[in-house]
Image: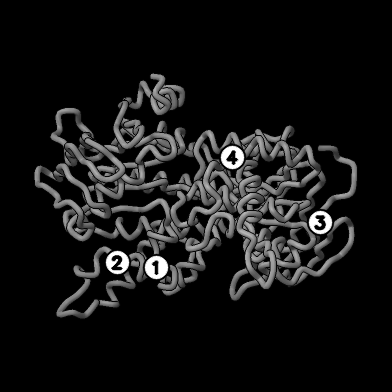
Amino acid sequence: MTDGGQPILELRGISKQFPGVRALDRVDLEVRPGEVHALLGENGAGKSTLIKIMAGVYTADRGEYLVQGRPVEVRNPRDALDLGVSVVFQELSQVESMSVAENVYFGRLPSVRLGIVDRARLNRQARDLLRQVGLDVDPSTRLGYLSVAQRQLVEIAHGLSHDAKVIAMDEPTSALSHTEIETLFGLIERLKAQGVGIVYVSHKLDELFRLSDRITVLRDGARVAELRTSETSSDELIALMVGRRVDSLFPRTDDRPVRAQDAPLLEVRGLTSADVRDIGFSVRAGEIVGFSGLMGSGRTELARALFGLDKSSGEVRLGGRPVPRGSSAKAVERGIGYVPEDRKGDGLVLVSTVRDNMMLAILRRLSRAGRVDRGRERRLADQMIERLRIKARSAEQTVAALSGGNQQKVTLARWLVKEDLRVLILDEPTRGIDIGSKAEIYRLITAVAKRGAAVLVMSSEMPELLSLCDRIYVLREGAIVGEYGHAEATQEKLMACALGEA
């Protein structure tokens, strides 16, 4: 990347207002040929709105959109694509019932005559793009059969299919394995060499320092800085993002009620499902126990089996009493909570209010003679909004309108409001969440443990596990293959164990 040359894309003085919210206030952004320009900011800072204006999903209230120095009008996503601007969104908009190839070339399927799709050509072209992103699947495979990580790579292939001059990637590594991340980084380097401009949105600072040439920081809808990556630091970026210094992103405390002589609160023996086998471990009250492993190792599948979402055999005992297998309702009755990886797809009712989502686990306790005590419900929801510092207009706001970090706080509030919570299972609790919100989520996780609950954290982020957890189990191919105490665990040991090299 060089400082000279005309930018491919310029957004000048972009402003956008939603009812009661100023999402963007006179924001500038430019992308030059062959550079990675990172976009950084907390959830709610305006990144997603700016990206959607770039993609033609939203239209700016004020400001200019220029391509190659020429003002253009972008009224919809097709206009943006025709101008060579492609956006790969974090929240995937794909058709699961269609094939991988059909999703890659959605809306532009090659045909032979009379609208009949040329399947051979379609699959051949899609296979070439899939190879570029490092995804080895049959293009004719139904998309719904793929994992979240594989679907992310399909979305990137879709972006590449437009021969774009600018590609924006919104949290592209949030669901990728270490190998897939390295493949993506190699792809980004090749695109840079071809003169493509990349807008890279991520909360992972190590990725930004490795990939980007410049970083634009947004806060509260305004641009607060544009910096050369080589001339800044993590501390400076965090301070710019949150408006304050974050001294400890991973707050570890030793005042939790964990004693080595205590009997286990949660005991798991021989737990086996379609995707995990012969799992055995125990967790004491007040302990935070992590589960590490590469993509496909069984972390999510273990969480689902424990919570009773997947059919399983084996024994799970809570406080010495067996928890019936295959029933999430029974798990909740016994005091087990679960925050899934896909909060939008599995964890939230997006069309419902913040209050409704928070109260799902305790509706029976709030009901008398079949009627819900709405007044008590509202009071509890307001208390949780204040306690968790959730940015919402009120408890009656639709949860879909909240930022990712605030949505995650709502899923946590559902279990924090449950007085008899004894075990909390968290699958990728900070996926796609900004640094400031991460620090708050970690404090909430620690607070749950201090209440005397056992906390299980399934995470692909090793620094997260190393800082939060008292012990870490490593999974490989659906089985536990290692266990490390907090003092002995390192990223190198966890990775070697996950790869089978320990």
Horizontal side of residue 330 vs 350, given as left or right: left
- For disc 3, the neighbor class at 10 Å (few under 14, some 14 to 19, many from 20) is many
Horizontal side of residue 259 vs 150, given as left or right: left
Q: Would you say residue 137 is visible in this rendering?
A: yes
Confirm or deny contact between disc 1 and disc 2 (CB under 8 A).
Answer: yes
Mark 2 / mark 4, whichever is N-terminal: 4
Residue at image position (79%, 41%) is 194
Is 401 located above or below residue 471 in the figure?
below
Quarter of the image with the N terminus is: top right
- For disc 4, the neighbor class at 10 Å (few under 14, some 14 to 19, many from 20) is many
Judging by the rendered image, the residue that carries numbered circle 2 is: 360
Is 486 located above or below residue 60 in the figure?
above
Q: Label 1 is placed on what type of residue? A: Val
The percent position of residue 139, horizontal first and vertical second, equals: 55, 51
Label 3 – label 4 distance at C-alpha: 31 Å
Q: Label 4 is placed on what type of residue? A: Gly
On residue 349, the disc is 1
Is 475 located above or below residue 24 in the figure?
above
Q: Is mark 1 on a helix, strand or loop?
A: loop
Q: What element carries label 3?
A: strand
Judging by the rendered image, the residue that carries numbered circle 3 is: 10
Q: Label 2 is placed on what type of residue? A: Leu
The percent position of residue 474, horizontal first and vertical second, equals: 35, 31
Label 1 – label 2 distance at C-alpha: 10 Å
The percent position of residue 111, horizontal first and vertical second, equals: 68, 64
Mark 3 / mark 1, whichever is N-terminal: 3
- For disc 1, the neighbor class at 10 Å (few under 14, some 14 to 19, many from 20) is some
| Quadrant assignment, res 446 | top left
Mark 2 / mark 3, whichever is N-terminal: 3
Label 4 – label 1 distance at C-alpha: 34 Å
